[in-house]
Amino acid sequence: MSSQSTPPADAPVAPVTGTTLSDVTVHPLVLLSVVDHYNRVARGTRKRAIGVLLGSVGRGGRVDVTNSFAVPFEEDLRDPAIFYLDHNYLESMHGMFRKINAKERVVGFYSTAPKIRPNDLRIHAVMSRYCPAPCLVNIDVRPEIRTIPTTAYVAVEEVDAGGGTDGSRVRTTFRHLPSLIGAIEAEEVGVEHLLRDINDPTSVSTVASLVRAKMSSLGGLTDRLVEMKGYLESVHAGERRVNNAIVYNMQTIFNLLPNLNVDELVKGALVKTNDMHMVIYLSSLIRSVIALHDLVSNKITYMDKDDGDVEEKGKDAEKKAEEKEKKIVLDDKRELAAKQ
């Protein structure tokens, strides 16, 4: 079964093929395609969707994933060694995509499972026929995820002490790669068009959107801290072997935390918070006064309009009454003339 580990920061990883990979950039079109594939195939089940990632590998081992397509895949949840991957369909789809864009090549495969599964190493071996250094990208399609939904891995060989004739053996495992979400200008316009009905900037104030973004960031930080806590507890209980790179990164993170027990820092934070709250309070007052002013102005405008309508109606009534009186007088004159 494959394991997960985190390399030191900014350290490129050399997979089993010798090609050096540094990070993986996933474009929005890939995320939309994966979500559509999952909803059609595995929604509401314990299954996962598997597909092929297309793109290019640039200088420095930067993998740019620009496109993808689904592949028929089945696996036995009780026996991880039993799975089915349609090679003929993969080769046929790859040939058609090459006719559309010859620059897009197979760079790896994706999985909608949130974690690595035992079959991933076997699928990696199959994908190695079409790509010298395939990467694995786990895309979490759950809507409640508040962080980046992509997690990238590359297969590497590690020496496992305690096996083999010389006391050690070489095993293949997955190592973590930094993953990014990137887009070109055309993709950014398309994403904004799709999100227009969900997140309308004209209907939500800037302050509310900033607060929502801060809450989402804090939720992601909480998830990361819980994950770190779970790892340390499992290492302490002997369920996992200690990874010095992970412990080193944790120590670096905690060393970068500021000392919040300094009086000057506490006072400065309180002053800054009070100033921000005062600005928010004054802004709310000004906004309320402006809203009331607009309401009064509208009321006065409509009242003037109503008064003008009443005056016009009164003049029309007076005019009609005069015409009626004139008509009555004329009728009386005509009757007198007729009698004479």
Image (spheres, rainbow, N blue to C red):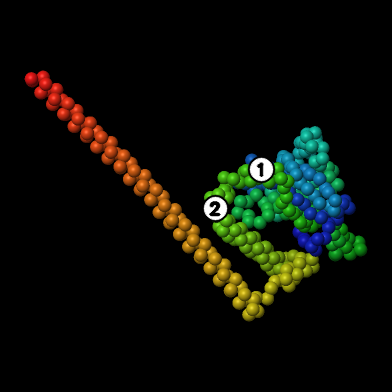
Say which quadrant the N terminus sits in: bottom right
Q: Residue at x 81, y 42 (%)?
A: 105
Q: Say if 177 sits above or below 336 in the image.
A: below
Q: Which residue is mark 2?
A: 204
Q: Amino acid at mark 1?
A: Gly
Q: Quadrant of residue 175?
A: bottom right
- Alpha carbon distance from label 1 to label 2: 21 Å
- Nearer the observer, 134 or 303: 303
Q: Is residue 219 left or right of residue 20?
A: left
Q: Quadrant of residue 160?
A: bottom right
- Nearer the observer, 181 or 318: 318
Disc 2 is placed on an element classified as loop
Q: Which residue is mark 1?
A: 190
Q: Residue at x 76, y 67 (%)?
A: 249
Instruction: Give percent across and percent down for residue 119.
Output: 75, 50
Q: Is residue 36 visible?
A: yes
Instruction: Give percent across and percent down for residue 83.
Output: 74, 44
Mark closest to the chain's N terminus, 1 or 2 = 1
Q: Is residue 203 left or right of residue 179?
A: left
Disc 1 is placed on an element classified as helix
